[in-house]
Amino acid sequence: MPEIVVAAESRAETGKNTNRRLRRKGMIPGVVYGTRKETIPVAVSPKEISAILRSAKGENTLFDIEIQGKKKRVILKEYQIEPLKGALLHADFYEVALDKALHVRVHIELKGLPVGVKVQGGILDFVTRELEIECLPADIPDKIEADVSHLEMGKHVRASELLLPPKVKMLSDPGSVIAHVVAPRAEEEVAAAAAPAEGAVAAEAAGAPAEPEGIKKGKIVAEGESEEKAEKPEKAEKKEKAEKKEKR
């Protein structure tokens, strides 16, 4: 892979207003620092940093940052992204020494289709997606593969089972579960069972029969009772008393 060189401009001014002006010009603020070295504020192109993030090693890519004609070998230590538009807002660069080990996090890539998914109808749950390692800058792997093709229902693969390159030391807990095959969740099964019932309710609503004659809005009429008496019980009672007086 050809060496990557990112041009950077040193900046004397810092602060929110200065950063806004930089972004309007198509640049983003950043800093270059290292162990026992001074911090240098810089401005860089977000397009170049985005290209590095999209590369095979991503944020673990080693590259040169050139400031006033001088190159420094760095790694992208931290960066900030605008949550809505996904635009880069800031980047920190760590100057490395090629003969000193670094602590970095490397992405894990699952390989294969588990038996528990293909044959037993399980679901593959990807639990741990990064592994913390220690190695020299030049030995940082692009990724670490985890073979899950042998996993049956209820089985898992742990960090201790992963094959690391010869010069890479694992810092993550060896007992960490990387992935496992689990049964479909109970709520998913309930939702699937409820779906036909909901369809039946919808169908009934589409061609629903009229309400029974005894059911009215806001009241129920007892069988054999006149609707008039149910609606106006006091009036019906007075009428009944008047009829009894006439008979006397």
Image (spheres, rainbow, N blue to C red):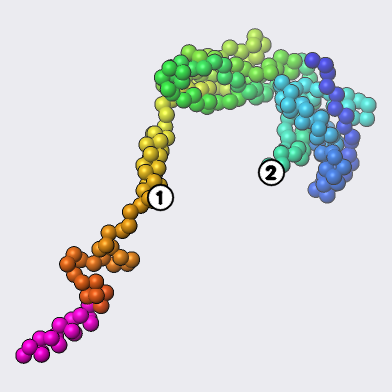
Magenta region: 233-248
Instruction: Tell me if residue 242 is in the magenta stretch.
Output: yes
Regarding mark 1 in the picture, which secondary structure is present there? helix
> What secondary structure is marked by label 2?
loop
Tell me if 107 is positioned left or right of 241 in this view: right
Residue type marked 2: Leu
Give residue 237's quadrant in the image.
Answer: bottom left
Residue 205 place in picture, x, y as percent: 39, 51
Q: Is residue 206 above or below residue 164?
A: below
Q: Nearer the viewer, residue 118 or 226?
A: 226
Residue 76 lies, in percent from the top left, at: 75, 28
Q: Main secondary structure of the magenta part?
A: helix
Q: Quadrant of residue 66?
A: top right
Q: Nearer the viewer, residue 164 or 118?
A: 118
Numbered circle sitting on residue 206: 1
How far is disc 2 from disc 1 in space, using C-alphas? 42 Å
Q: What's the mark number on residue 84?
A: 2
Give me the residue at 22% from left, 81% from top: 234
The answer to whether residue 112 shows anywhere in this view is yes
Quadrant where the image shows the C terminus: bottom left
Q: Amino acid at mark 1?
A: Ala
Marks 2 and 1 in Cβ contact (< 8 Å): no
Q: Residue at x 78, y 17 (%)?
A: 98
Disc 2: CA contacts within 10 A as few (<14), some (14-19) or many (>=20) = few
Say if 183 sits above or below 167 in the image: below
What percent of the width, then of the height, locates residue 14? 84, 44
- The question of residue 47 being in magenta is answered with no
Crowding at mark 1 (Cα within 10 Å: few <14, some 14-19, many 20+) = few
Name the side, left or right, on which 121 lies relative to 88.
left
Q: Looking at the picture, how far across and down is residue 207, in whole percent?
A: 38, 50
Residue 100 got which mark? none
